[in-house]
Image: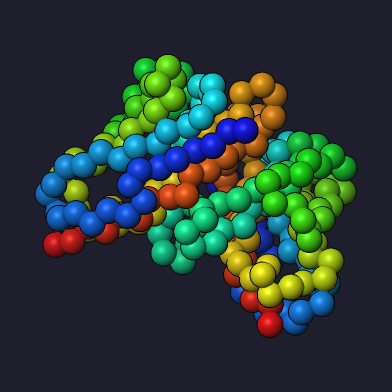
Amino acid sequence: DVKVTQSSRYLVKRTGEKVFLECVQDMDHENMFWYRQDPGLGLRLIYFSYDVKMKEKGDIPEGYSVSREKKERFSLILESASTNQTSMYLCASRQGWEKLFFGSGTQLSVL
Amino acid sequence: ELKVEQNPLFLSMQEGKNYTIYCNYSTTSDRLYWYRQDPGKSLESLFVLLSNGAVKQEGRLMASLDTKARLSTLHITAAVHDLSATYFCAVDHQGGSEKLVFGKGMKLTVNP
């Protein structure tokens, strides 16, 4: 069965901390995505990657960076966490134009 | 820039009733996806619509795509409480980029 695994379901961090969110997929998909979900705003794309070491900015990349050193793993990095980055973070992957497969999400709280 | 709009954003309906929800998008695309999200859970795929006139059905839900009107509909037949969830549509950028743009989601509540 297809799987996208996010390392943490809940995370609490302090303002200014560096935060790593990890995502692993076992489907050999080329494309991986990071979205954040906020009430009333739907899903907004932060970054996506279409190949190892390749990345492209989404709609709201400010304050975030990403890393894709291996095909199966896509990491989202908050260089210096701020309270306005408190959100649900969803990782997803897909092959070409197929449907997205989502991880279970990480609820991040920045205090 | 591709924009995706869902209408309505909130819907409360009674069990047994029918209703249609809408998803409009602003630029040419022939790939549209519907997802469902239960409270506290992630998104799961419902339908993939890949051409003009595509129609897919699963249980009490039927989705269709009109690429000329840039419109997809999700029709609910004889709603039941288990359909209560948030429904998202998402559209592919046409022209090379494999990123999906999502609507804001429609929260459906089906009351007994």
- The answer to whether residue B79 is left or right of residue A94 is left
- Image quadrant containing the C terminus of chain A: bottom right
- Residue A79, percent across and down? 84, 66
Please tell me whether residue A90 is drawn above or below residue B23 in the rendered image: below
- Residue in view at x 68 percent, y 46 percent: A59
Question: Looking at the image, what colour scheme do you see?
Answer: rainbow
On the question of residue B21 being in view, the answer is yes
On the question of residue B90 being in view, the answer is no
- Residue A71, percent across and down? 80, 43
- The answer to whether residue A96 is left or right of residue B52 is right
- Residue B22, percent across and down? 34, 37
Q: Quadrant of residue B69?
A: top left
Please tell me whether residue A39 is drawn above or below residue B29 in the rendered image: below
- The answer to whether residue A95 is left or right of residue B86 is right
Q: Quadrant of residue B3?
A: top right
Instruction: Pick the residue in front: A6 or B7.
Output: B7
- Residue B42, percent across and down? 51, 57
